[in-house]
Image (spheres, coloured by chain):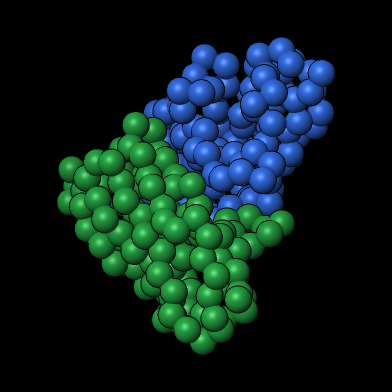
Amino acid sequence: QVQLVESGGGVVRPGDSLRLSCVASGFTFSRSDMHWVRQAPGKGLEWVAFIRNDGRIVYADSVKGRFTISRDNSKNTLYLQMNSLRADDTALYYCTEGRVDFDYWGQGTLVTVSS
Amino acid sequence: DVVMTQSPLSLPVTLGQPASISCRSSQSLVHSDGNTYLIWFHQRPGQSPRRLIYKVSKRGSGVPDRFSGIGSGTDFTLEISRVEADDVGVYYCMQATLWPLTFGGGTKVEIK
């Protein structure tokens, strides 16, 4: 069955960096498009970034220039490199599969940015 | 950016009764490929979102037929024919037609 497992979250200070990972199994990762979506505590869902199977990338304006989405198909892993973190980046970060599918989600990894 | 406006914000419902959530987009969600990528999710407290409906009206795998989606263009509705206790939580619409992808603000469903 499809599984997405995020990791890498933690508590960091403003300006710090963090790299999130999402390990995929149960489907052909190399052929799949992937997204990162986040949810601030007690708030709604916000789309963050997308990477197509051929490497095309799109970012939300709120993270453009600070976050980098990437993938390693040999490891079935999706990444989100987050630099220059701000307090408003505090959220539960989910990875999800498919350009328009959003059928499978991980359990999320919590990022807290606080001084 | 496409703004997704959901209403109501909060929806108290009676078990066994129908419920309806509206989602309006600021632009048409018809993609150049002819599809309309409007998705509905349900999120229970402490859980990841679960996709209910995709492409406006197609039910996801394992989704009860009590849930249905209707609409076109900029106006969409999620309908629950008979609310069950398990249906509490927050419902979100999302458009995946235009970049950046955007979500509605959510509708909290609770039992009266």
A23 left or right, relative to B21: right
A107 left or right, relative to A100: right
Comparing A43 with B97, the one in front is A43
Location of residue A83 (image quadrant): top right
B30 left or right, relative to B42: left
Compared to residue A60, the image places residue A2 above or below, namely below
Q: Position of residue A73 (x, y in %)?
A: 56, 37
Which residue is at 36% across, 55% downward?
A: B23
Q: Position of residue A28 (x, y in %)?
A: 51, 50
Q: Is residue B103 visible?
A: yes
Compared to residue B34, the image places residue B70 above or below, namely below
Q: Position of residue A15 (x, y in %)?
A: 71, 12
Which residue appears farthest toward the bottom when viewing the image?
B16
B83 left or right, relative to A57: right
Q: Quadrant of the C terminus of chain A?
A: top right
Q: Colour of chain B?
A: green
Q: Colour of chain A?
A: blue
Comparing B51 with B103, the one in front is B103
Which residue is at 40% across, 39% downward?
A: B101
Q: Is residue A23 visible?
A: no
Which residue is at 47% across, 79% downward?
A: B64
Q: Position of residue B20 (x, y in %)?
A: 40, 69
